[in-house]
Image: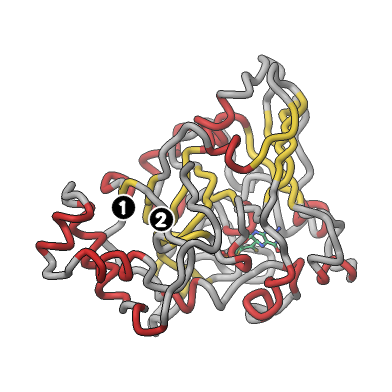
């Protein structure tokens, strides 16, 4: 089991360790040194190391850092990653999800897999993750609204998960759906979007090694407001493609209609690749503000992942397919 049994870790306030300890630990891990040795080198006894592991009071995860998928940019503070969110199922402002998402029950959790695939059915979260080891990847995350973060996600490559369901040759796209339950997600009582939240990827985007299913951040299980227990992270696309609290994965021949594309097609396209050259109809996408920083920075094409993903769109007019 990759996720530890709930309720077995009790973190006292005195055990909560600073961001710097977390980072120090991560640096050692990235250097390829195991947990015990790394923390001993850092001058921390193992008990304290365990506490550092649960630095933010969440349930710790076992994972392997992927230095090749890391960024040397400063991480966005944990408190910002987990308190400044978009999750319309819990309200349309940025601060409501952190206050209200506790009503979401993430255990037990099951995901329906169907459509153009040989293996389909209902799978528990553990079934979906098994047998892949969790990895930590530090990705830039750029929201269409002009803010961005640098987040240490914990997850597994989506492609590895999808391969297990044996998509057929007709599976050209993958559609994802969020849970629909207005009791648990009170924002769904208001028709600000056509619920449930739907997103989609072309199959080659879904299989791309950068695309992950995340179950954690900062070494711990995802807080509800960040899309627990299972969310998509597609780092070269605007944040709204990274659908949260997924309950359905559907392989299809037809391009899915994403929630935002359905709501305002002139503003939100299916592809939504980060592109400073294509303005949103109401604002420029040339710059972004890193949460926690004062000066805006230049937005990079494909959010800086151009080398890895540009070939997916060779020959496509990205102004048309925005
Ligand atoms: N998924 C669902 N189900 N509902 C949402 O409202 N918002 C999207 C995306 N996934 C959203 C969602 C948007 S607009 C963004 S920017 C990111 O989640 C925000 O992720 P974060 O809160 O973890 O930063």
> Where does residue 72 sit, x and y in percent of width and height?
26, 60
Q: Which residue is drawn at 39% across and 67% down?
A: 54
Q: In this view, does 248 lie above or below 28?
A: above
Residue where numbered disc 1 is placed: 70
Q: What element carries label 2?
A: strand
In this orientation, which residue lies closer to the viewer: 190 or 39? 39
Disc 1 C-beta below 8 A from ligand 1: no
Q: Front-most of 138 and 129?
A: 129
27 above or below 305? below
Horizontal side of 255 relative to 54 (left or right) equals right
SS label for mark 1: loop
**Residue labelled with disc 2:** 139
**Whether residue 146 is situated above or below residue 305 in the rendered picture:** below
Of the four image quadrants, the one with ligand 1 is bottom right
Q: Which residue is drawn at 46% across and 44% down?
A: 2
Would residue 321 be seen by someone viewing this image from the given angle? yes
**Mark 1, residues whose alpha carbon is within 10 Å: few (<14), some, or many (≥20)?**
some
Q: Where is residue 77 in the image (x, y as percent from the top left)?
A: 40, 76
Q: Residue at the front extreme?
A: 8
């Amino acid at each position: 089991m990759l996720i530890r049994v709930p309720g077995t870790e009790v973190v006292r306030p005195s055990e909560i360790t600073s961001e710097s300890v977390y980072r120090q630990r991560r640096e050692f891990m990235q250097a390829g040194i195991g947990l015990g040795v790394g923390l001993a080198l850092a001058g921390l006894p193992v008990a304290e190391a365990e506490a550092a592991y649960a630095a933010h009071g969440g349930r710790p995860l076992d994972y392997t850092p992927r230095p090749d998928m890391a960024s040397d940019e400063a991480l966005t503070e944990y408190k910002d990653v987990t308190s400044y969110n978009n999750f319309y199922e819990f309200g349309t402002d940025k601060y409501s999800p952190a206050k209200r998402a506790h009503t979401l029950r993430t255990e037990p959790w099951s995901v329906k897999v169907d459509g153009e695939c040989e293996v389909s059915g209902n799978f528990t979260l553990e079934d979906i993750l098994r047998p892949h080891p969790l990895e930590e990847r530090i990705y830039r995350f750029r929201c269409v609204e002009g803010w961005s973060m640098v987040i240490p996600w914990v997850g597994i490559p989506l492609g590895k998960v999808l391969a297990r369901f044996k998509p057929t040759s007709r599976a050209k796209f993958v559609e994802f759906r969020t849970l629909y339950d207005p009791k648990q997600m009170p924002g769904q009582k208001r028709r600000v979007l056509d619920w449930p939240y739907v997103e989609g990827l072309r199959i080659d985007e879904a299989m791309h090694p950068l695309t992950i299913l995340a179950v954690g951040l900062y070494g711990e299980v995802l807080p509800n407001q960040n899309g627990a227990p299972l969310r998509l992270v597609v780092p070269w696309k605007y944040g709204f493609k990274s659908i949260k609290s997924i309950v359905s994965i559907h392989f299809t021949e037809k391009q899915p209609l994403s929630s935002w594309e359905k709501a305002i097609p002139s503003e939100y396209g299916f592809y939504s690749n980060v592109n400073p050259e294509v303005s949103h109809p109401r604002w420029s996408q040339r710059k972004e503000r890193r949460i926690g920083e004062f000066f805006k920075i230049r937005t990079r094409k494909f959010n800086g992942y151009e080398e890895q993903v540009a070939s997916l769109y060779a020959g496509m007019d990205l102004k048309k397919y925005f």
